[in-house]
Image (tube, grey):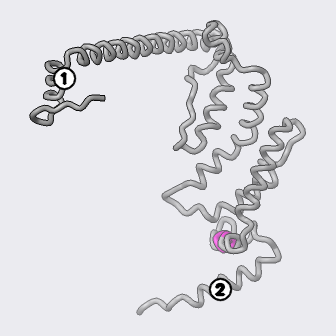
Amino acid sequence: MKSVASKGSSTTNLLQHLKQKHPAEWEKCCAQRNEKDRGTTSTSRTAAKIHWKKRRDMSEVQAELGLPTHQPLTESPTRWGSRQRMIERFLEQEKALVRVLGSDKKSRHLVPTWQDLDVLESINKAVKPLQEFTDALSGKSYVSVSYIKPVLHLFKTSLLQPEEEDAELTKTIKGKIMRYLDDKYSDPVKDELLDMSSLVDPRFRTTYIDPDKVEPVKKRAVAEMMSLPAPAN
């Protein structure tokens, strides 16, 4: 790479210097730039054209099959639950997507196999029930820590309990999620905090506290209240 000197420091001056003092290099740069621009524009136009055609075909197939006129979703790394919503939307539109992708030899390799669909259905069945509770526990305008014990109880006794019709993958995912949650909240300090939060919430009180811990939790709550400074007159 050659260094060039020019009065001033603007890009315009440097380009003028290159054009006047190094015409061969200037012509070469211009040729490379034009070639790159043509390639980029051509690719963009082709992609846009294909994308437009796929959207049109998708709408036609959706109408024919009586499916909702929803477009596929993409996963966002910064949005919790976007993967589950993407999978759910894919399964909703699976018949239409298979028709559209399968009609073009360039996209035919993207048509999911029955094994792919089995995996997606198993994942969605295991994690979909958790989505609503995740949103509820992520509230910023209200206290949600007292919800944790009731939600964990619901997961253990219902939502994450393996069912007879569940695929093996669904059962495995449910089991791993439950073990992760048990491990995450098994710390005694965390457990005490959750018990205290549940106790002072009038909706739950002692319902979700281990019966052997109810009295110690009550005594601790009374002791902490008694230790608070008296209000000023």
Q: CA distance from mark 2 to mark 1?
A: 83 Å
Q: Residue furthest left?
A: 7
Location of the C terminus (image quadrant)? bottom left
The residue that appears at 75% across and 26% down in the rendered structure is 116
**Between disc 2 and disc 1, whose residue precedes?**
1
32 w.r.t. 232: above or below: above
Q: Which residue: 13% across, 32% down? A: 6
Question: For the view shown, which residue lies furthest in the front direction?
Answer: 2
Q: Secondary structure at mark 2?
A: helix
Which span is picked out in magenta?
194-199
Q: Quadrant of residue 81?
A: top right
Q: Is residue 110 above or below residue 200?
A: above
Residue 94 image point, x, y percent: 68, 20
Using a 10 Å C-alpha cutoff, classify the residue at mark 1 as few (fewer than 14 neighbours), some (14 to 19) or many (20 or more).
some
Quarter of the rendering occupied by the N terminus: top left
Which of these two is toward me, 185 or 198?
185
Q: Amino acid at mark 1?
A: Leu
The location of residue 224, given as percent across then percent down, is: 61, 85
- Dot 1 corresponds to which residue? 18
Q: Position of residue 121 (x, y in %)?
A: 75, 31
